[in-house]
Amino acid sequence: MPDETRTEPRLPAATPNAPGSRGLPAPTGAPGEVQGPRPAAWVTPLVVAGLVLAALNLRPAITSLGPLLEDVRGGLHMSGTVAGVLTSVPPFCFAVFGFTAPRLARRFGPGAVICAGMAAITAGLLIRPFTSGTPAFLAASALALMGIAVGNVLMPVIVKRYFPDRVGTMTGLYSMALALGTAFAAAATVPMTEALGGSWRVGLGVWAVLAALAVPPWVVLVRDRSAAAAASPAGGALGAGGTSLLRSRTAWALACYFGIQASGAYITMGWMPTVFRDAGLSASTAGLLLAVTMVMGVPLAFVIPRLATRLRNQGPIAVVLGLCGLAAFAGLHLAPASGAWLWAVLLGISNCSFPLALTMIGMRSRTGAGVVRLSAFAQSTGYLMSIPGPLLIGVLHQSTGGWGLPLALMAGFLVPQMVAGVVAGRDRTIEDETRMRD
């Protein structure tokens, strides 16, 4: 779209006989970056389908477990402590395995790594429900989360490579699919479990079917020479080297922004139903309110990235989203029951910091190489930062017996999040700050 090409360097138009003059636009990059051949035109819809199907599978492994956690604990004789640790496993795995994504992508290509990631999610979700003990359950969960981790990091890279002039639109599309998968798994797991006989093992295992559907498009893309050449290291997108991102203020701001918003999202998913139930609402109403919060991300995850790419500075969006969160937490403290639906909507808006963070990752580098490093750094570092948040909220709630202090802490997190968003939203790239050469 015309308004979204501002963030990308313009290249001379391809001549009719030039390599890559057909199909998808050649990947853009910094001056002197080697450009690969363009894939055939039919690859475009297949990449879109692959992105959407992959995004749908980046959260059901997590949100399908929550509604059945008590059944899983009983079936596996899992202690409450281990169950609590289980809720902290996803961000830990995202951080650890996310750091490996750039090296894997340089060696095998991002498409091949995402393909393997979807296969890992399928295998993990298929094995996990039929394990006989907690260690095997955790190992199978880690396998699925490993696939999710590399998908988290490399999705912005695929967008940058195949759709350099539509970063906002395509980021919005797969962010919307991710939000839809998150909400659908949370809402549909229990009804599907009941419809399939009531076994929690079947209720968890059925999500492997959705994951399996995401594998074929990536297999075709990896096997097709024109598509693979455009997204391979030979195409110049994922060259090794580069100055450490530790020197980049923008990279650190993105990592902090990503980490604080991730912590807030896990706090919301883990604790908001309890807040509403403690306010006197029924369990079904509390679950519905959480679904409303999650569903808000579906349309806004498409709108916000497109809006962000039209602005030179994305800081104001980060501030508005943060203010919505502050209003929600204030409302939860003052009138948790009477204004519950409004607070759920405001929390849903605030949680759309996630697609904004993904969009800024794609905009803060000129090259595919920069995006893959920045995505790995911001997401892995951010997920490490997010681990203590949900645990701390639980400790404060248990020690105080109420929600006043935990809600104040949740609101307090939003202040540095907004500051980091303002810094990360400035119109500059990591190459400007680190003098990377890709």
Image (cartoon, grey):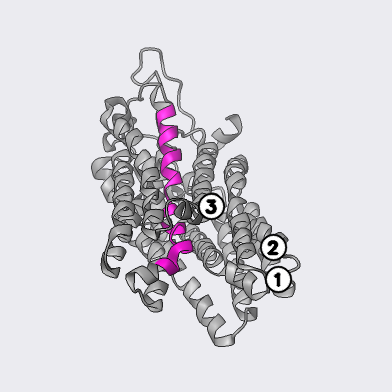
User: Residue 3, relative to residue 195: is it above or below?
Assistant: above
- Classified by dominant secondary structure, the portion drawn in magenta counts as helix
Report the number of numbered marks. Answer: 3
Foreground mark, 2 or 3? 3
Disc 2 and disc 3: Cα gap in Å? Answer: 18 Å
Q: Is residue 394 visible?
A: yes
Q: Which structural element holds mark 3?
A: helix
Q: Which mark is residue 183?
A: 3
The answer to whether mark 1 and mark 2 are in CB contact below 8 A is yes
Disc 3 and disc 1: Cα gap in Å? Answer: 22 Å
User: Residue 115, relative to residue 269: is it above or below?
Assistant: above
Q: Front-most of 35 and 135? A: 135
Q: Is residue 30 visible?
A: no
Q: Magenta span has 59? A: yes
Which residue matches tag 1? Answer: 336
Neighbours of disc 1 within 10 Å: few (<14), some (14-19), many (20+):
many
Which residues lie in the magenta part?
A: 45-71
Which residue matches tag 2? Answer: 343
Q: Which structural element holds mark 1?
A: loop
Q: Which structural element holds mark 2?
A: helix
Q: Magenta span has 120? A: no
Is 375 on the left or on the right of 232, as rendered? Answer: right
Where's residue 141, x and y in %? 33, 60
Disc 1 and disc 2: Cα gap in Å? Answer: 8 Å
The answer to whether mark 2 and mark 3 are in CB contact below 8 A is no
Q: Which mark is residue 347?
A: none
Q: Tell me which amino acid carries mark 3.
A: Ala
Q: Front-most of 191 and 22? A: 191
The answer to whether mark 3 and mark 1 are in CB contact below 8 A is no
Where's residue 2, x and y in %? 59, 29
Residue at 74% x, 74% y is: 334
Residue at 43% x, 63% y is: 383
